[in-house]
Image (spheres, rainbow, N blue to C red):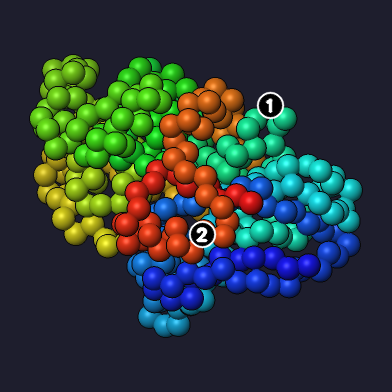
Amino acid sequence: MRDRVVVVSGPGRVELVEQDADELRDGTFRVRTLYSGVSAGTELSFVKGTNPYLNVTWNSVLGLFQPGEASTPYPVARLGYMQVGRVVESRTPAVAVGTVGAMTYGHRTGHVADPLAERFVPLPDDLDPLLGVYVAHMGPICANGLLHAAADLRGTDVRSLGDGVAGRRVAVVGSGVVALLTALFARHHGAASVVVLDPTPQRRAVAEALGLQTLDPGADDPAVVLKTRWNHAAGDRGADVVFQCRGQAWALQLALRLLRPHGTVIDLAFYQAGADAVRFGEEFHHNGLSLRCAQIGRVPRGLAPTWDRERLSAETVDLLRAYGDRIRTHLVSAVVPFDQAPELLTDLAERRRQELQVVLTG
């Protein structure tokens, strides 16, 4: 048995490689891939050569990038974290043959998994399995953003993802997949207002099709617009919380300007080129703002026992049940045969092709 695997052999070089399938051992199960979602930010950073793991050593003990050998050198053979597979063989009573589940094993046509070492999230029968690409990892990334907003208000006593957004004014900077799912989470959990800000008309159109309000940051100053609209008290105007989802300095600078005094930016972006242009001597300083990174590698301090990845996946399934038809229609912009993955990824990296969410299949 052979598997096809997407491999990045160097900057701008993506290949489809055939490999012998792993042996099925006692306690493991084999899946055949149904769908594999492309995460444009993380994956394309390996294709472009901009991911820091390619150039320096990540010291996980100290939590520091340091000079040394690359932590993830080329060739990169495990690319992607949005897979849906059907179990075709099993030697564990924990996972039955025929089950369809979400996983994070990278772009490959098949995979042998150990349920003691890897997450397998069975998908409910009433969910479109294509939408399962969001369940294992991408959805939890966005849910973790709301969890950080909730912890900002409630500390460790977070009972619901709505604890940080319910009844509050929420701005979301960016309108990629992370931004739009985060905006839908906020709306789903009772935000009083949700406004998505992005300079790209096509992206704003998708947000509007999902039922979200939008603003063009290149038109009237959006900070003036929202601070005029969102009044809390004298001298207290603006967003309660901003979810920053676009990895560019101007986006973080805008996020800070949108906040009310003592507000918080929850940052879900990946700044591959840094953010040197952010001006911390202006609104950040004078309005006493906060900036929290909501990186999926950890939930807020003290919440891991009650808000593990399984709970965040369950919250994602709940969101997909509520908005699945809209997400499938408006967010998933292309479904592409697996054989076209190398051309697709290089075209996306070189900006010869523009897509919101691509899903590989077959």
What amino acid is found at the position of numbered circle 2 in the picture? Answer: Ala
Position of 257 compared to 20: left or right?
A: left
Percent across and percent down for residue 29 are: 81, 56
Q: Which mark is residue 94?
A: none
Residue plotted at (47% across, 39% down): 332
Q: Which mark is residue 341?
A: 2
Percent across and percent down for residue 136 are: 60, 45
Is residue 10 in sight in this rendering?
yes
254 and 260: which is toward the camera: 254
Vertical order, 278 against 197 (above or below):
below
104 and 166: which is toward the camera: 104
Vertical order, 198 against 68 (above or below):
above
Position of 275 compared to 59: left or right?
A: left
* Res 53 → quadrant: bottom left
Percent across and percent down for residue 203 are: 31, 37
Mark 1, Cα crowd under 10 Å, few <14 / some 14-19 / many 20+, is few
Percent across and percent down for residue 175 are: 33, 38
Position of 233 compared to 74: left or right?
A: left
Position of 190 compared to 220: left or right?
A: right
Measured Cα–Cα span from mark 1 to mark 2: 29 Å
Residue plotted at (32% across, 57% down): 352
Q: If you read the primary sequence from the N terminus, does the residue marked by circle 1 or circle 2 appear first?
A: 1
Vertical order, 146 against 14 (above or below):
above
Residue plotted at (78% across, 42% down): 99
Vertical order, 166 against 29 (above or below):
above
Mark 2, Cα crowd under 10 Å, few <14 / some 14-19 / many 20+, is many
What amino acid is found at the position of numbered circle 1 in the picture? Answer: Asp
Residue under label 1: 126
* Viewer-side label of 1, 2: 2
Residue plotted at (45% across, 62% down): 343
